[in-house]
Image: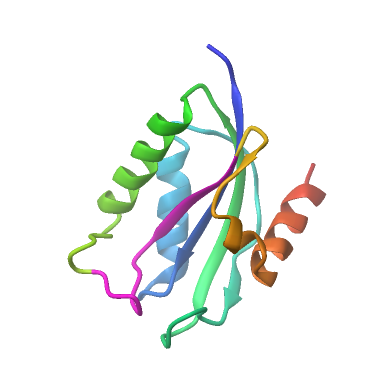
């Protein structure tokens, strides 16, 4: 099986944000070989009025293809309390996004955000 390099972002603006991010990292380790994790970064909300978000970025490898990895990350979100019918745009228990899979970028508009660029820069400095 080929090994794929991935970059994943985590975010939460719900109670116990730090714990939510740590729980997400722990769950992701079940199907990712994590090689680097940025320190959490507190950011202002973008596109909605809510409490600040705590964000983090992960670098890792996986044998899963993109669709399977995406399904696993969405299942992890649900396991950690995120449910589409409960979440509102202003309250997010946990958000897990695949930003980079091998050399293909996802969530293009997010890459333009300052905090994503900072997290990515921090992640690459750990290499």
Q: Which residue is most to the left? A: 85
Give the number of callouts.
Answer: 0
In this picture the colour scheme is rainbow
> Where in the figure is residue 49, as x and y percent of width and height?
42, 88
State the residue lying farthest toward the front: 109
- Displayed quadrant of residue 82: bottom left
Q: With 24 as the anchor, is 124 left or right in this view?
A: right
Q: Is residue 2 above or below residue 39?
A: above
Location of the C terminus (image quadrant): top right
Hey, which quadrant is residue 85 in on the image? bottom left
Compared with 18, 53 (above or below) is below
Q: Is residue 91 magenta?
A: yes
Depth order, front residue of 104/94: 104
The span shown in magenta is 87-100
Q: Position of residue 121 (x, y in %)?
A: 77, 57
- In this view, 5 is above or below 25: above
Residue furthest top in the image: 1
Q: Is residue 10 left or right of residue 115?
A: left
Tell me the residue at 47%/25% (across/down).
65
* Residue depicted at x 35% and y 76%: 15
The residue lying at 71 percent from left, 55 percent from top is 120
Indicate whether residue 64 is drawn in magenta.
no
| Most foreground residue, 71 or 109 | 109
The part of the image, by quadrant, that contains residue 17 is bottom left
Q: Position of residue 71 (x, y in %)?
A: 34, 38
> Which residue is pictured at 49% across the width and 82% down the height?
52
How far from the left and from the top, in percent, is residue 74? 34, 46
């Amino acid at each position: 099986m080929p090994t794929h390099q991935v970059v994943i972002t985590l975010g939460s603006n719900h109670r116990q944000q730090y714990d939510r991010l740590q729980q997400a990292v722990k769950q992701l380790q079940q199907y990712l070989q994590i090689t680097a994790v940025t320190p959490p970064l507190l950011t202002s909300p973008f596109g909605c009025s809510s409490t600040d978000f705590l964000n983090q970025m992960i670098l890792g490898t996986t044998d899963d293809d993109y669709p399977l990895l995406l399904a696993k990350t969405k299942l992890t979100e649900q396991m950690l309390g995120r449910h589409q019918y409960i979440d509102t745009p202003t309250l997010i228990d946990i958000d897990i996004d695949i930003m980079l899979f091998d050399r293909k970028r996802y969530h293009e508009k997010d890459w333009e955000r300052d905090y994503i660029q900072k997290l990515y820069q921090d992640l690459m400095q750990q290499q």
